[in-house]
Amino acid sequence: MHLKNIAVTGGSDNYGKIGVTAAKSALTSLGLKPSTVQSYAETATTLSSIVLAQKGSDGVFSWGYPNPLAVQQKEMVQDGELVPFLTNTGGEQTASGGLVPATQIKNLYITAPCNPNTTSYSKTLSAYTSAYKAKYTTTPLINSAWGYDGVMAIAHAVTIAKSIKPAAINSALSKVSFNAACGVFKATSKHVLNHQ
């Protein structure tokens, strides 16, 4: 894409702040500085001041939940800002839910650890996607694969614990490690279950 003038926006909650911080850090590592950095309330019904402030940028990075992401993208189209819009998996929900104008979808880029639409890089993702398509006749959303992996993590913990007692499962979760739909899924030393 070769973008040099990127506006960074995100929700004012911790989730949004983490995304904004990561984006600023990534830009700095590339020798770039955001054209503007702004936050919005996750309950925002208009983002016109943010959209106006990002005007002139050749790309927008926005980290938030689907509703404000949809508002931002709609207002960008209304303002004639048809630039690349990079976002988290909330962007998938705005596109698949019809919340974003078609003129903006072609500019939408989603950061995700796995993509059920492109499975050639992972045998486990390919198997999950094939089974999902056979049952539901549609491609799963990213969050479907994540949800499946989460349920499978609990199933693995129950197997390790050889029990369904909460304390035993909690203890076993720190030992969970398996090839999930979206890659290796295991607990960190801080008991955070995630794809590695």
Image (spheres, rainbow, N blue to C red):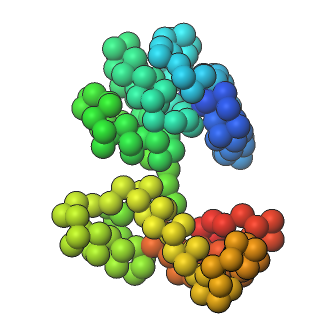
Question: x, y (%) of residue 143?
Answer: 44, 55
Is 139 placed above or below 108 here? below
Q: Quadrant of the N terminus?
A: top left
Q: Which of 162 and 131 is in front in this view?
A: 162
Is 183 placed above or below 139 here? below
Residue farthest front in this picture = 165
Question: x, y (%) of residue 173?
Answer: 69, 75
Observer able to see residue 55: no
- Specify whether 19 is left or right of 101: right
Is 173 placed above or below 1 here? below
Quadrant position of residue 41: top right
Residue farthest right in this picture = 189
Q: Which residue is drawn at 69% across and 41% down?
A: 18
Observer able to see residue 22: yes
Is 26 placed above or below 74 here? below
Quadrant position of residue 61: top right
Q: Which residue is drawn at 49% across and 62% down?
A: 146
- Specify whether 167 is left or right of 51: right
Question: x, y (%) of residue 135?
Answer: 23, 70
Q: Residue at x 63, y 70 (%)?
A: 196
Q: Which residue is drawn at 40% across and 81% down?
A: 123
Q: Which of 105 and 150 is in front in this view?
A: 150
- Specify whether 166 is left or right of 115: right
Question: x, y (%) of residue 37?
Answer: 66, 24
